[in-house]
Image: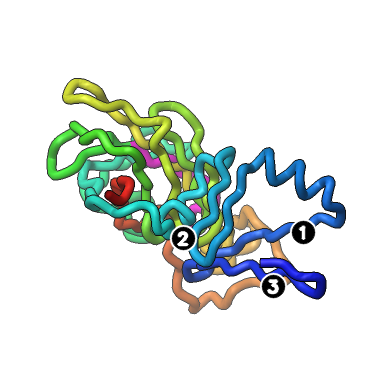
Amino acid sequence: TASEEYTDVELSLAQAETRFVVFTHTSEVNERNSERHKTCLDSRVVKLEDEVNDSTLLLQSAEVQHIDTLVVDGTWSVTFPGMDDSVTLDSLCSWTSMAVPDEVRAYAGTASYTTHLTAGGSTHLPRGPRYVLHLGRVEQVARVFVNGHEVQTLWTAPYHVDITPYLHYGPFRTNTLTIEVTNTWYNRLLWDVRRPESERHTWTSHWPLPTSDFRPSGLLGPVTLTRCDARP
């Protein structure tokens, strides 16, 4: 709502969610933006038709219902740069807990996760108007690809995104999900500070304490798909 003295915009935000609210200064610009975005504001629903991946607003919309949530329960192949072989996971866990060399557990950088979207052991996704992918817990940043198409980079909670335009439907179609996850360099610093200076690969003016614990890294999940439909 707007008046001569103030503008009141009510938004519903998930935990740790951030949004940019931009106000322009001229009515001419406002009219042009309003037409371009075809924006409808009320107390709970914001529609921006040219923002395909505005999944938070989709999930909060009073005009949709959540039909079901499908657990992505397939195996994951995880690739680290410099490793000849990928790591196969039946369930997601931190890099610090994987069956990899000790130094890889302290890796700082980007690792790639790949799986085929399955639900209850089946690769057949029932057709629905919208599918929202939830990554669960991510340490720290996730770049999402579906069937080779880059969808979005998610850098803060909630880690979810609308992947509907990128999915294949039908019993003989396979959907490949790839998540590139990047952590901080804290674990690498901790690994290095425990070694002689001649063996270190990083340098900083403020090292973590050598007695500190490694921090969780990677895609921790659980990863799910929420199928949304229009309310009757």
Task: Look at label 3 and name its amino acid.
Answer: His
Q: Where in the figure is residue 140, as x and y percent of width and height?
A: 51, 58
Q: In this view, does 163 lie above or below 95?
A: above
Most extreme residue toward the front is: 3
Most extreme residue toward the left is: 121
Q: In this view, does 195 lie above or below 153?
A: below
Task: Look at label 2 and name its amino acid.
Answer: Pro
Q: Where in the figure is residue 32, as x and y percent of width and height?
A: 76, 41
Mark-to-mark CA distance, 1 and 3: 40 Å
Q: What stretch is highlighted in magenta?
A: 106-114
Question: Foreground: 194 or 37?
Answer: 37
Locate residue 36 relative to residue 90 in the image: left or right. Answer: right
**Disc 3 target residue:** 206
Q: Where in the figure is residue 37, as x and y percent of width and height?
A: 64, 42
**Disc 2 target residue:** 158
Tell me the crowding category of disc 2: few under 14, some 14 to 19, or many 20 or more residues within 10 angstroms, Cα based: many
